[in-house]
Amino acid sequence: MADLERVRVWAEALIRMHLDDSWSFGFDRAAKRAGLTNYTSRRITVSKHLAARWDDDEVHQTLLHEVAHAMVGPRAGHGPLWRRTAREIGYVGGRTHQGEIAAERAGWVGVCPGGHEHVRFRAPRGRYACKPCTRSARRMVEVRWQRREQAA
């Protein structure tokens, strides 16, 4: 687990090394997204929930990913310029994180008849199929949703 104060120090050092003084760093409350580069406010953020559960290397890679975005600008996306820039500053990951999400923060929990648990952060609309059960049964196996009780 990464120490959040240490993450802040790394982020600020990377910003000083690769960007100008107009950029800043902060934590956000994202539960599925690892990081974000906001070009309008010139601010890089990392999910405090995910950073607290990931190891140092995963968080450092997220910071490098976002700094590379800030370096190349909003039009580059995850294209060749972004990939080259990210590699040059030490990024070795992919375009998106594949780590766990902060599922305990999801407001909706669903269970299928097969016992698979599903989570959603927004209220489910319509019917949802449990992919593993639907695939094996060759028919739609529906997930039943329930609002999660929020701990006080």
Image: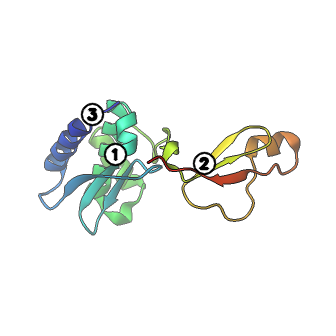
Q: x, y (%) of residue 136?
A: 84, 39
Q: Secondary structure at mark 1?
A: helix
- Lateral position of residue 84 relative to residue 103, left or right: left
Q: Secondary structure at mark 3?
A: loop
Query: Residue 3 got which mark?
Result: 3
Q: Is residue 91 visible?
A: no
User: In percent of the image, x 71 and y 39: which residue is there?
Assistant: 116
- Lateral position of residue 54 relative to residue 73, left or right: right
User: In percent of the image, x 72 and y 64: which residue is there?
Assistant: 126
Mark 3 surroundings: few (<14), some (14-19) or many (≥20) residues within 10 A: some
* N-term-proximal mark, 2 vs 1: 1
Q: Answer yes or no: do the residues labelled 2 and 3 have beta carbons within 8 Å?
A: no
Rendered view: 93 above or below 78: above
Q: x, y (%) of residue 143?
A: 74, 50
Q: Secondary structure at mark 2?
A: strand
Q: Residue furthest bottom?
A: 40
* Foreground pick, 79 / 115: 115
* Cα distance between the residues tagged 2 and 1: 19 Å
* Foreground pick, 4 / 43: 4
- Lateral position of residue 29 relative to residue 97, left or right: left
| Residue receiving disc 1 | 48
Q: Residue furthest front?
A: 152
Mark 1 surroundings: few (<14), some (14-19) or many (≥20) residues within 10 A: many
* N-term-proximal mark, 1 vs 3: 3
Q: x, y (%) of residue 103?
A: 52, 44
Task: Look at the image and tell me in which quarter the N terminus lies.
Answer: top left
* Cα distance between the residues tagged 1 and 3: 10 Å
Q: Amino acid at mark 1?
A: Lys
User: In percent of the image, x 50 and y 39: which residue is there?
Assistant: 100
Rendered view: 130 above or below 23: above
| Residue receiving disc 2 | 119
* Foreground pick, 53 / 67: 53
